[in-house]
Image (cartoon, rainbow, N blue to C red):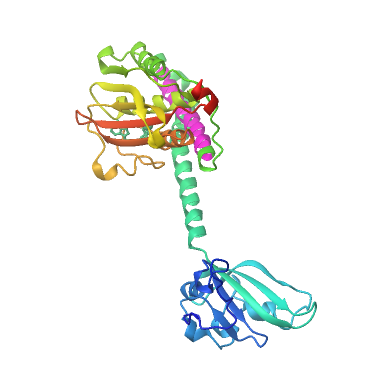
Amino acid sequence: MNVRSTAEACPPAVEGLVPHADELPDGLVVADATGRVTCFNAAAARITAVRAEQALGRPLESVLPLEDLDGRRWWQLTDPYGGLATRAGQPERNLLLPGGRQVLVTARYVRERPTGPVVRLVVQLRGTEARRRTERSHAELIATVAHELRSPLTSVKGFTATLLAKWERFTDDQKRLMLETVDADADRVTRLIAELLDISRIDSGRLEVRRQPVDMAAAVRRHVQAYTTGGLGEDRFRVEVTGPLPALWADPDKIDQVLGNLLENAVRHGEGTVTIEVSAARLKARTEGTAVTVSDEGPGIPEESMTRVFTRFWRGSKRGGTGLGLYIVKGIIDAHGGTITVGRGPRGGAQFRFTLPVGAPAFLERG
Ligand SMILES: Nc1ncnc2c1ncn2[C@@H]1O[C@H](COP(=O)(O)OP(=O)(O)O)[C@@H](O)[C@H]1O
Ligand SMILES: [Mg+2]
């Protein structure tokens, strides 16, 4: 028998069926009819920083001197052995250990017959670090979002207030300039909100992929054309399609979002010619797929930042942007069952490569 938790009351391990108490991920503390600790597993020792030898045989109240958030002693408050004889336990509560460490506690009162005395008290402990970490990251997200929304709105408010107060004093050109800034800032807020909605869908797994046949080469050419008619020189882009390409079933709007973000980044953060290569790819499990590589000739992304580019709000340069684009791109590619990687291009700039599986139902793939 395992003597690390040295206890008859710990549930005995049954090979292949019941794990030993020390293998449980949560803290398990059991007290007998007199309130003395008979089982104190490894997770309980880790969470409370009390060793099993120090706990076993001692009164539960002194081993686990729990207090609620108002500083009241929990065992006195709940009185498991003396309280209402119909009570079956205590629901999960956030309590404090000595030193202010928070722990989630659930208790079950075991009685041999209904309304009889408590013969065993089973307490489950769970650390709150993971939960606190997510809460902290939510708080950080809200702070960042609020900050991102405030700067364009401050500018909108400043220019509109100035125009309303001193309309006569500005020339038409000055007014136009201010309104253009307001216009651009309003676009920025709208875009930020659209991106945040995408992120919320990605994070909660609600991003829907409506698959249709997609012509990737045509989609790439369409994006390039939008840039060249928008005034960028044709020599800024090179499109290389290596056929034949396998079929591709994907969400066309989302593929447009991916291409739009990668090309925008290459133009905004990169320099020189942007090369887009489209080819067939052999993916894992020997499935066919499409690969797209976007490379530029700019400064590229420093080696040490490459792991961070796909995280939200990460921005390397100061050239505008919200730092959400690549996070969304990765979310969309993941939702399609594809992959995306970043590296260095042949001419020094950044290179993004994504692959997408065919994505069609099997009967269509064979046909
Ligand atoms: N082609 C590129 N060349 C250099 N840096 C890039 C390139 N693409 C992305 N980056 C870096 O990655 C960061 C994150 O990109 P992204 O998530 O699209 O945010 P944004 O473009 O809004 O800043 C950018 O701020 C930039 O520093
Ligand atoms: Mg971007």
Residue at the left extreme of this rendering: 347
User: At 53% across and 23% down in the image, what residue appears?
Assistant: 364
User: At 56% across and 70% down in the image, what residue appears?
Assistant: 125
Q: Is residue 181 above or below residue 340?
A: above
Residue 17 point in image, percent of width and height: 57, 66
Task: Let me know if residue 355 appears in the view.
Answer: yes
Q: Main secondary structure of the magenta part?
A: helix
Q: Is residue 275 left or right of residue 36?
A: left
Quarter of the view holding residue 26: bottom right
Residue 255 point in image, percent of width and height: 45, 25
Q: How many marks?
A: 0
Task: Let me know if residue 361 appears in the view.
Answer: no
User: At 26% across and 17% down in the image, what residue appears?
Assistant: 236
Residue 87 point in image, percent of width and height: 75, 74
Span shown in magenta: 174-200
User: At 39% across and 42% down in the image, what residue appears?
Assistant: 311
Instruction: Between residue 62 and residue 72, name the one nearer to us.
Output: 62
Residue 38 point in image, percent of width and height: 58, 84
Instruction: Between residue 221 and residue 170, name the one nearer to us.
Output: 221
132 part of magenta stretch: no
188 part of magenta stretch: yes
Instruction: Between residue 32 and residue 196, name the one nearer to us.
Output: 32
Quarter of the view holding residue 224: top left
Q: Quadrant of ligand 2?
A: top left
Q: Is residue 121 above or below residue 244?
A: below
